[in-house]
Image (cartoon, grey):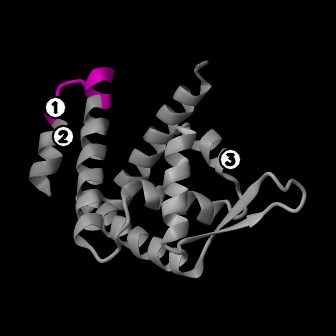
Amino acid sequence: MRKQVDKVNQMPDASPDEVFESIHTIMHLYRSRQYRALREGPHELTHMEDKVLGYFSRHPGATQSDLAAHSGRDKAQLTRLIRGLRDKGLLDAEVDENDRRSTRLHVSASGKAMHRAVHALGARLARRAMAGLSDAESRQLAALLARVQTTLEAEPE
């Protein structure tokens, strides 16, 4: 761990571009390992399918339109993803009693189990990625990234 600390302390001041390039590289590495685990695992689930399951796990009874507004994804792409998840028995749909044109989506029991298993893979990967940081450094990194996020969210689009 000493070499990592020394390497960090010897880095020149990082420009905002370099910082964001580093964040991008880290996320690319993280996601590529997630995708590999999904492809090689027993889950038969794509990254986007897992994201959709995660959304409906956090927002039971939400609609496809809710997901589109949240994700900014194309409605046709979401329609295909949702249809695939329903065909696999991972999402259940029910007609909204207040608006028969609207369908409310819920993660099925098997969808919840699959999402938990995939989430556990991601959590293990995140723990391995953060293993070189102390608890204090992890908290500091999270706080700094939260400040950057807050600044970006305050910017007009």
Q: Are marks 1 and 2 in contact (CB under 8 Å)?
A: yes
The residue shown at (48%, 56%) is 51
Q: What element carries label 3?
A: helix
The residue shown at (47%, 32%) is 148
Quarter of the image where one finds residue 83: bottom right
| Label 1 vs label 3, nearer the camera | 3
The Cα atoms of the two marked residues, 3 and 2, are separated by 42 Å
Does 123 sit above or below residue 133?
A: below
115 within the magenta span:
no
The disc, 3 or 2, on the residue closer to the chain's N-terminal end is: 2
Q: Which amino acid does label 1 sit on?
A: Met
Q: Position of residue 145 (x, y in %)?
A: 44, 40
Pointer 2: what residue?
A: 8
The Cα atoms of the two marked residues, 1 and 3, are separated by 44 Å
Q: What residue type is labelled 2?
A: Val
The dot on residue 11 is: 1
Q: What element carries label 2?
A: helix
The disc, 1 or 3, on the residue closer to the chain's N-terminal end is: 1
Q: Give the magenta part as a residue range.
A: 10-20
Residue 22 appears in the rendering = yes
Q: In this view, does 7 lie to the left or right of 119?
A: left
Q: Where is residue 93 in the image (x, y as percent from the top left)?
A: 68, 66
